[in-house]
Image (cartoon, coloured by chain):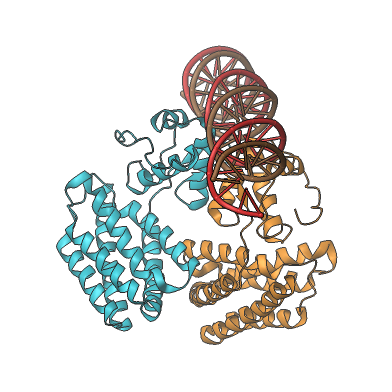
Chain colours: A cyan, B orange, C red, D brown
Amino acid sequence: MNNSLPKVATPVGPAGTASSRVFDNLRKDLVGGRFVAGEKLAINALKEHYQVGLSPLREALNKLAAYGLLVQENQRGFRVPKLSREELDDIAHMRLEMEGMALERAIANGDSLWEADLLAAAHRLKRADITLDKGEEWEHLHTQFHRTLVAPCGSVWLLRFIEQLHDQFDRYRRLGPKMPTIRQELDEQHHQLVELALQRDAKAARELMDDHIHKSYEVALKRYQEHA
Amino acid sequence: MNNSLPKVATPVGPAGTASSRVFDNLRKDLVGGRFVAGEKLAINALKEHYQVGLSPLREALNKLAAYGLLVQENQRGFRVPKLSREELDDIAHMRLEMEGMALERAIANGDSLWEADLLAAAHRLKRADITLDKGEEWEHLHTQFHRTLVAPCGSVWLLRFIEQLHDQFDRYRRLGPKMPTIRQELDEQHHQLVELALQRDAKAARELMDDHIHKSYEVALKRYQEHA
DNA sequence: GTAGGTTAAAAAATCGATTATCTTGTCTAA
DNA sequence: TTAGACAAGATAATCGATTTTTTAACCTAC
């Protein structure tokens, strides 16, 4: 394991199963770059760390493997997938295609409730204190913003794939200790995206989205290269 | 469970884990329409049917849920996802977009080895006896053909999504007892697809692919409507 | 009659221990 | 010296039993 993972909080709310809890936590830690790419998971250590038994842990690991955040090797357990320039390019390219498509469709379909949600999500994101909580709060709101943006695209499967690609992309973007980031610039783009969406200017919105993803890609690539 | 599942053969080759074996078998049965959509899985019955213990079975179910062939409800087990006209349309639409994209890229990238593989796959498919083995053999070769067609598209993630969409689509297309099908017509399209691919005519190939998917969609829709 | 509550049976989730497989270090023979 | 065989320890996969939760049937009070 990379460096000390933060001790995981026991569930607060209606408490799903142990399995789903450890799935969420592991997903968060995998996407957040808290594991070393390529490392083999020590199941017993995880068991202790996430405070669950073997069965729910293994169920979570199996789900994560099917989702693509882990790889399962024949009879030798689970590994964190390796990172590669080729894959990063692939993911970024797919994001361009799919989020572009989704955005155009969302602009065509979104109603006024969507407009309100979008404004709210953008506002929350802007207000977020990025220094807080190791940027976790900002990350969450950022994800929420992008989710909201494409939500009314009309395709459940498209949304699902986009979500998956986001998770994969973040494995690169969130490499290393913190988020220095070019937040100013990105926030400006978020703001403009909302503007264009409200104006229903699909073409311009898609172009800006392309640019936005491209900027994120540059951040991720830099992280990947510095990562070594 | 729908009607008597065929007793599952024990593994022949190098024998992966029990978990992976039951995953494969369950996936095949789910895609092949051997379960009733919406039904709740009786874990004990499955345990017996697939001749595995509880742990590997649950691990397989968890993987299938993450993959989208099952839905897992909070503390009440696993269900076969419901079918709906809206989802069928969604899946078909996504297939159009993604396989079209993949085909264009494959035609741009594919080398002469690909050409050979493609001819071989098409030939095998044509030769296949559709009456044999409840059409399983034909189904397998059909899947293989489409896989081969888009294989050199250059995107691992695109291929992954296409595979997933195929599985989902087949839940509709393979509803009901058998495959009467308009095989003549489909086989003709397969043949033409190979022709156009070899000629590197991306535009025409994509158009034909659109038409091909549309025809499959009509079959699937009919199945779904007759299914009731 | 119906809403709400209680409880027995069924099913899901989890645990603890066992079995099978892989890994590593050591030894032997060429 | 080194390739290969072997054994001991570590790890993965699986099993059987336990715990927890849901479901469904029944009962009671209004």
Picture quadrant where residue A144 is located: bottom left
Tell me if residue A26 comes above or below residue A189 in the rendering. above
Asked whether D25 or B191 is in front, the reply is D25
Residue B127 image offset from top left, x and y in percent: 79, 72
Left-right relation of B136 to B218: right
Tell me if residue A222 comes above or below residue A114 in the rendering. above
State the count of labels.
0
Left-right relation of A180 to B35: left
| Residue shown at 53% from the left, 52% from the top | B66
Asked whether A99 or B58 is in front, the reply is B58
Asked whether B141 or B180 is in front, the reply is B180
Quarter holding the N terminus of chain A is top left
Residue A94 image offset from top left, x and y in percent: 41, 67
| Residue shown at 61% from the left, 49% from the top | B78
Residue B83 image offset from top left, x and y in percent: 63, 66
Q: Residue furthest left?
A: A184
| Residue shown at 61% from the left, 59% from the top | B81
Picture quadrant where residue A6 is located: top left
Residue B26 image offset from top left, x and y in percent: 68, 51
User: Looking at the image, can residue B67 be seen?
Assistant: yes
User: Looking at the image, can residue B15 be seen?
Assistant: no
| Residue shown at 57% from the left, 63% from the top | B163
